[in-house]
Image: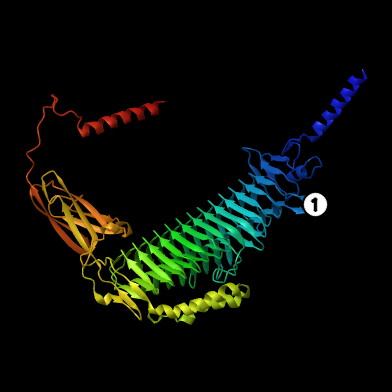
């Protein structure tokens, strides 16, 4: 009996211990008319509300400023319309003497701010703000706590900033937010973040920022800004971020009286990815400057700027599509920039690799116009510069250059398609060892120039002045910038002696004018150049048949054949094929170059004769195709009989059979 009592006591004690260590489930507290609590704050403050509890708020308007000092999930009840009307700040999540709101989530509220108010203010750690609709006030969301995530919010009608960050630690993720109608005086911002310490990760992805306007005298707009800036025309300070990702954001309909920065990213990131962003309709007033995408990444990793689309940029002083400065490896690829206009200096794209290589490849730049200075793509590298397979069209200014290559070690300019309007410069190169080949450089007053500073205006000292000013204004950057400044000074003086090999390029003519090549103080070898040829295969056909017409620039003026190097050739605009007999789609067709080759099909559908077929890319070449009468070799077969010697189904029948089967399958699937 004693043994039995002892066993029962042991089981009882074990049970107590077991239940004492079993996690307690979070409690959900209901807020609203007829619910447990009538205000959000009373639900939070109640002594029975603990960390990890849920505050579920039902339909209604709540006139309160909510302080969150516990780790809570505060959410609008699913499907309900919950509005918060604060006096100053909707939700303030704190970690102070009153408690710790770190780890809290604010989800699904409509917050209507007073004129100078803030929707949500986060100073605690590890918080999430999502699915809220914040209207009015000075700032939509303000964050100073580390490891914060801000996703899928709608923020509009603020007088200064949509999302404001002032951070010193952790990560910051801003994703899927819609920010619009920010109308300010001297300053209006979509997303602006200052880093006063160090962040591990800064991720800005999938946000849409639109209708941001600074209407005051000299007003400035930042679409997305990372760094401490003294204004769009000032010298921004560097933000300490280990990993930077800025991906698939849309910034559009931005205006200012003074200056606009669509994307400004000034960081020490080891690696950076800036990709898939779309920026358009950035328009500034008299005396203004616009930089659609500006990135200065002072880390030693790889900076990838890819797949960004920039369009419709106007300014008065300076208008730039993309400018990227990288201390490490720089890659700028597959970007699309078009319609930059009005500014005294308009530039499509500029990439500067400070210590390592810079590669600019497969970018398309078009319609860059200025009453003064216009440039399409500018590439600079202190190590090796590669400018490969870019397309640049329509760069127009009183002084214009379609492509500038300044490689202070070696420079490779290959496979680019550059077309002018009969004026200006095709390629200006500044390199002790430059190679320019397999490019299309058509319709320019000057095809290739070795660089001379005196030809373009500013002195070497004037070009170095921005670095001198940066050192003066930011002495803390002198250890980084002073060696760069000294190296540039030395190299600028050396680079006026460029040595350039520019053989095997197509200039839109089989006999380019020697006067359109300028060697400056160096050397420039441009012979042999490529020549345009046309061929027909076959050259004799019957009525109803076709001939393949090819135009190519695979041979050079000395008779060399470069068809084996086709992958290195340019692509893009363009060849016009014409014929006087038959058709090539009609009597003429425009075809894009594909690796130095363009193809059309001549159809003999107008009877017999001699067809004169031409191919024109400024230069015109022609070939003849003999068209005979209809072929008499075809065999007539009775539709009701089967030729026993023909053991296969005709190709047309196979195609029809496949289409019928596919059609049946599709129809069947639709019925299910």
Q: Tell whether 390 sits left or right of 547.
A: right
> Where's residue 178, x and y in %?
55, 51
Q: Tell whether 420 sits left or right of 122.
A: left
Q: Is residue 2 above or below residue 543?
A: above
Q: Nearer the viewer, residue 56 or 579?
A: 579
> Where's residue 50, x and y in %?
77, 42
Q: Is residue 193 above or below residue 449?
A: above
> Quick check: can you spot residue 160?
no
Q: Tell whether 46 sits left or right of 129.
A: right
Residue plotted at (35% across, 79% down): 522
Q: Is residue 98 above or below residue 314?
A: above
In which quarter of the view is residue 346 placed? bottom left
User: Quadrant of the image for the C terminus?
Assistant: top left
Q: Residue furthest right?
A: 2
Q: Nearer the viewer, residue 375 or 244?
A: 244
> Quick check: can you spot residue 53?
yes
In which quarter of the view is residue 397 placed? bottom left
**Number of callouts:** 1
Which residue lies under the disc numbered 1? 98
Residue plotted at (62% across, 75% down): 475
SS label for mark 1 = loop
> Where's residue 529, x and y in %?
25, 68
Query: Around disc 1, counting alpha carbons within 10 Å, would you say few (fewer than 14), some (14 to 19), or many (20 or more)?
Result: few
Q: Nearer the viewer, residue 642 or 104?
A: 642
Q: Residue furthest top?
A: 1
Q: How is the image coloured?
A: rainbow
In which quarter of the view is residue 241 placed? bottom right
Residue plotted at (61% across, 50% down): 150
Q: Is residue 129 above or below residue 345?
A: above
> Where's residue 30, x and y in %?
72, 37
User: Quadrant of the image for the N terminus?
Assistant: top right
């Amino acid at each position: 009996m004693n043994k039995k009592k002892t066993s029962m006591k042991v089981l009882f004690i074990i049970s107590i211990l077991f239940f004492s260590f079993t996690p307690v489930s979070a409690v959900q507290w209901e807020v609203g008319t007829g619910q447990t609590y009538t205000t959000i704050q009373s639900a939070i403050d109640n002594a029975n509300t603990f960390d990890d509890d849920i505050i579920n708020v039902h339909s209604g308007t709540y006139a309160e400023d909510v302080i969150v000092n516990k780790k809570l999930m505060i959410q609008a009840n699913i499907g309900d319309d919950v509005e918060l009307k604060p006096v100053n700040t909707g939700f303030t999540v704190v970690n102070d003497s009153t408690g710790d709101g770190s780890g809290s989530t604010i989800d699904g509220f409509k917050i209507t701010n007073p004129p100078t108010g803030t929707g949500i203010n986060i100073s605690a750690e590890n918080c999430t703000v999502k699915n809220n609709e914040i209207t009015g006030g000075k700032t939509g969301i303000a964050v100073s706590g580390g490891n914060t995530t801000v996703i899928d919010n709608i923020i509009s009608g603020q007088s200064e900033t949509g999302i404001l960050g002032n951070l010193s630690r952790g990560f910051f993720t801003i994703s899927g937010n819609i920010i619009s109608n920010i109308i300010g005086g001297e300053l209006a911002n979509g997303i602006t973040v200052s880093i006063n310490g160090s962040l591990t990760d800064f991720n800005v992805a999938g946000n849409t920022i639109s209708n941001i306007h600074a209407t005051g005298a000299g007003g400035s707009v930042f679409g997305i800004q990372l760094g401490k800036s003294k204004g769009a025309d000032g010298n921004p300070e560097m933000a300490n971020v280990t990993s930077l990702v800025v991906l698939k954001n849309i910034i559009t309909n931005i205006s200012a009286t003074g200056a606009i920065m669509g994307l400004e990213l000034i960081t020490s990131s080891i690696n950076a990815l800036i990709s898939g962003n779309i920026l358009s309709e950035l328009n500034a007033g008299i005396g203004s400057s616009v930089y659609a995408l500006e990135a200065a990444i002072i880390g030693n990793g790889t900076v990838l700027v890819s797949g960004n689309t920039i369009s419709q940029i106007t300014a008065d002083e300076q208008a730039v599509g993309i400018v990227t400065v990288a201390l490490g490896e720089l890659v700028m690829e597959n970007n699309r920039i078009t319609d930059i206009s009005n500014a005294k200096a308009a530039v499509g794209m500029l990439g500067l690799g400070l210590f390592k290589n810079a590669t600019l490849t497969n970018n398309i730049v078009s319609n860059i116009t200025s009453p003064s200075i216009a440039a399409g793509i500018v590439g600079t590298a202190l190590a090796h510069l590669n400018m490969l397979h870019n397309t640049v069209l329509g760069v127009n200014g009183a002084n214009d250059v379609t492509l500038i290559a300044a490689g202070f070690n070696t420079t490779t300019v290959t496979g680019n398609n550059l077309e002018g309007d009969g004026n200006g410069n095709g390629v200006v190169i500044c390199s002790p060892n430059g190679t320019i080949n397999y490019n299309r450089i058509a319709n320019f007053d000057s095809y290739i120039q070795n660089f001379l500073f005196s030809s373009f205006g500013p002195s070497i000292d004037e070009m170095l002045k921005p670095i001198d000013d940066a050192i003066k204004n930011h002495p803390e950057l002198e250890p980084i910038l002073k060696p760069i400044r000294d190296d540039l000074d030395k190299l600028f003086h050396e680079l006026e002696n460029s040595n350039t090999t520019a053989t095997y390029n197509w200039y839109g003519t089989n006999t380019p004018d020697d006067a359109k090549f300028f060697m400056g103080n160096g050397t420039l070898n441009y012979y042999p150049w490529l020549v345009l040829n046309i061929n027909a295969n076959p050259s004799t056909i019957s009525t109803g048949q076709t001939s393949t017409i090819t135009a190519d620039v695979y041979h050079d003026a000395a008779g060399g054949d470069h068809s084996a190097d086709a992958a290195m050739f340019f692509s893009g605009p363009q060849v016009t094929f014409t014929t006087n007999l038959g058709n090539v789609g009609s009597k003429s067709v425009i075809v894009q170059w594909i690796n130095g080759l363009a193809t059309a099909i001549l159809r003999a559908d107008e009877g017999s004769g001699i067809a004169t077929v031409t191919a024109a890319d400024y230069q015109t070449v022609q070939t003849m195709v003999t068209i005979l009468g209809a072929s008499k070799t075809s065999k007539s077969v009775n539709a009701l009989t089967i030729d026993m010697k023909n053991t296969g189904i005709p190709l047309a029948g196979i195609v029809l059979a496949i289409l019928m089967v596919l059609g049946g399958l599709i129809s069947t699937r639709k019925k299910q």
